[in-house]
Amino acid sequence: METSSARVHAIGQTEINWDKLDKTKFYVVGAGLFTGVTVALYPVSVVKTRLQVASKDTAERNAFSVIRGILKTDGVPGLYRGFGTVITGAIPARIIFLTTLETTKIAAFKMVEPFKLAEPTQAAIANGLAGMTASLSSQAVFVPIDVVSQKLMVQGYSGHAKYNGGLDVVRKVLKSDGIIGLYRGFGLSVVTYAPSSAVWWASYGSSQRVIWRLLGHSNEFQEAIPSELTIVAVQAAGGIIAGATASCITTPLDTIKTRLQVMGHDQKRTSAMKVVKQLIKEDGWKGLYRGLGPRFFSMSAWGTSMILTYEYLKRLCAKDM
């Protein structure tokens, strides 16, 4: 059995600490598990991206019409445009993210502990800081992946250029804009993903504590450690709440970022402010929430799938005590 030192805090009896994991097994098995989750949910990202970059005259104005259009012109493979690029870059990016997340979370919990805050508040602060730091540390890898994959997702759509795979995108971007072209929208990515990650992990950490209290479990679980099914259900609920909260708060920034990243090489002078004005001109303020439905679903579904996979992975890779 694991001792109480293998856990973080009271509800921490359901959380496995970073120092109790077999790191090699964690990274190898994790690569396979998260690849599977990405395969299942990647089409949602393609649909969201197309909705966000659609011009005013584009006939496909909702998720279902976008899906029909993709299947009609490209079949199922069209829903996976840019997938190879994402998978290739996601492995090192995820290693950076998860390592930073877990190590920062432990340090943050120790930092806030002396303040004697309510446990949901402690969890929100520690998880939020960890999520933001992890996002910031991985953006150097994530942003070029975003730029290349999103150009592939929308190629030939609504007037966007066509490419012969990810390497062709990289070659053309470097030729026209240099290395800076691969980091187009970097500032907005940081502004979008860092708060989004902070909100997601803060919501996840604090909502779990609230749910446990609503279920009648005391802070120390003195009566009995909950069953694995109960733990999974609480983690899933936390993932849904976190995804819904983060998507509602950060969709406008994500829409602006996506538009900047997929613009053609002849649109170098376009700024975030010009994108905002164009969106408002076309659709009013609701234009900033283009793709909210798919993003809401994506972040909730991805968040729930990711966190269940992640927590399962940690249980699978926990060292025997």
Image (spheres, rainbow, N blue to C red):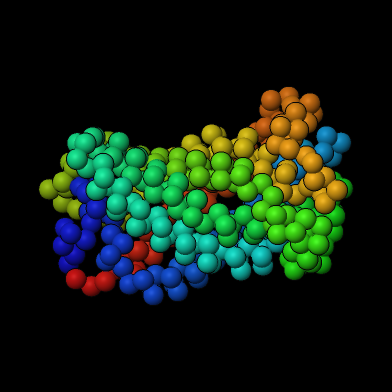
Residue 275 in sight from this viewpoint: yes
In the image, 176 versus 295, the foreground residue is: 176
Task: Residue 223 in the image: state x and y as whole percent.
Answer: 12, 48
Task: Residue 283 in the image: state x and y as whole percent.
Answer: 76, 27
Residue 55's place in the image compared with 28, above or below, is above
In the image, 8 versus 77, the foreground residue is: 8
In the image, 103 versus 44, the foreground residue is: 103
Query: Would you say 207 lies left or right of 62 here?
Result: left
**Quarter of the picture holding the C terminus:** bottom left
Query: Would you say 110 lies left or right of 272 here?
Result: left
Residue lying at 78% horizontally and 55% vertically, measured from the top left: 177
Residue lying at 49% horizontally and 40% vertically, measured from the top left: 195
Q: Quadrant of residue 288?
A: top right
**Quarter of the picture holding the N terminus:** bottom left
In the image, 71 versus 130, the foreground residue is: 130
Q: Number of labelled discs?
A: 0
Task: Residue 79 in the image: state x and y as whole percent.
Answer: 71, 58
User: Residue extending furthest left?
Assistant: 222
Residue 230 in sight from this viewpoint: no
Residue lying at 31% horizontally and 47% vertically, measured from the top left: 108
Residue lying at 39% horizontally and 49% vertically, measured from the top left: 130
Task: Residue 190 in the image: state x and y as whole percent.
Answer: 56, 46
